[in-house]
Each structure stands twice: as structure tokens, then as C-alpha cells.
Amino acid sequence: MESGPAIFAGVVFALFGGGLLLWTVTRLRRGEPVAQGVRPALSATLASVAAVTALVLGAWCLTRI
């Protein structure tokens, strides 16, 4: 019974992390800013770190089933 919330949280983290990473890579390949009003290198780094963190959290939640 307790695996339901872990599965839900893991899937949400994985989808968010994957989507954010895909969006960041797409913006960088097009040469567009990742965030308005922020240095490009800083915004790309922070977005990538957030995406990888979400993917790691998603994987961790899914291994706890």
C-alpha cells in the first residue's frame, strides 16, 4: 500500500526532470536564453542541476518500491 505514493512521486520527479533537461538542451541548441534577464551560462547551469537533481530523486523514489 505504501508503494503508491513512492511510484507517484518518482514518476512526477522523473517527468519534470526529463522535461526540464530536454527544454534546456533545446534552448541552448537554438542559441536562445534559458531564462530572461540572467547570464546564459548561469541559467543553463542552474536549470541543468535542477533537472539532474529531479531525475536522481525520481530514480531514488522508484528504487524504494
Image (cartoon, grey):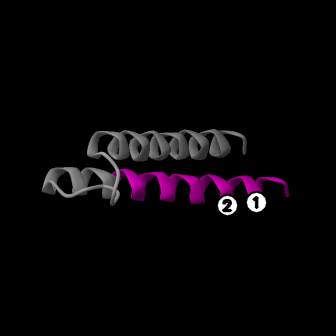
Give the residue drawn at x 77%, y 53%. 3
* 37 vs 64, nearest the viewer: 37
Secondary structure mostly taken by the magenta-highlighted segment of the chain: helix
The image quarter in which residue 39 lies: top left
Asked whether the residues under the numbered discs 2 and 1 touch, taking CB atoms below 8 Å apart as contact, a structural biologist would say yes
**Image position, residue 4 (x, y; %):** 76, 59
- As drawn, the label of residue 19 is none
Secondary structure under badge 1?
Answer: helix
Q: Amino acid at mark 1?
A: Gly
Image quadrant holding the C terminus, namely top right
**Image position, residue 55 (x, y; %):** 51, 44
Give the residue drawn at x 62%, y 52%. 10
Question: How far apart in space, not on screen, are marks 2 and 1 (Cα)?
Answer: 6 Å
Q: Amino acid at mark 2?
A: Phe
Q: In the orientation shown, which residue stands out farthest toward the right? A: 1
Secondary structure under badge 2?
Answer: helix
The residues colored magenta run 1-21
- As drawn, the label of residue 8 is 2
**Image position, residue 51 (x, y; %):** 46, 47
Q: In the orientation shown, which residue stands out farthest toward the front? A: 37
Drawn side of residue 59 relative to residue 26, left or right: right
**Image position, residue 2 (x, y; %):** 84, 54
Image quadrant holding the N terminus, namely bottom right
Q: Residues within 10 Å of mark 1 (few under 14, many from 20)?
A: few
Q: Is residue 7 above or below residue 53?
A: below
* 16 vs 35, nearest the viewer: 35
Give the residue drawn at x 49%, y 58%. 15
- As drawn, the label of residue 4 is 1
